[in-house]
Image (spheres, rainbow, N blue to C red):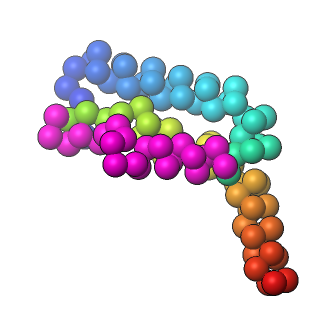
Amino acid sequence: MRYETRAERARLRVVRALISLAILVASPVLLTAGAPIRRRYLRHLYRDEGPLILDKQQGQVSAHYFVIIHPLLGWLCWPTETLARLIEHRSHTTN
């Protein structure tokens, strides 16, 4: 996706920086309860009447897109997602 003006590119950089800052501020919460929070957030975005993440016709990208693809979010949610998978796997094998 091409951004034509300097203002558009600057706005994009500011949004990315603010998302990184917000993820760092929320990191203690994400480390302890990241998997359920991330699943609920993704369910909110992908519901039928959810906000558009990418609008190619108008050339717009939502801030949600940058939150979803941010590697720091994945890294911070990884421990609780692994733990949730392990608990789910063990509960299925013991039954």
Residue 42 location in percent, x, y?
A: 50, 48
Q: Residue at x 29, y 21 (%)?
A: 8
Q: Note whether 94 is above or below 5 in the view shown.
A: below
Look at the image and give the residue range highlighted in magenta: 36-58
Q: Which residue is drawn at 76% across and 54% down?
A: 79
Q: Which residue is drawn at 25% across and 33% down?
A: 60
Q: Note whether 59 is above or below 7 in the view shown.
A: below
Which of 93/16 is in front? 93
Q: Is residue 61 visible?
A: yes
Which of 2/41 is in front? 41
Q: Note whether 36 is above or below 63 in the view shown.
A: below
12 sits left or right of 30 in the view: left
Quadrant in which the C terminus appears? bottom right
31 sits left or right of 53 in the view: right
57 sits left or right of 16 in the view: left
Name the residue furthest top.
7
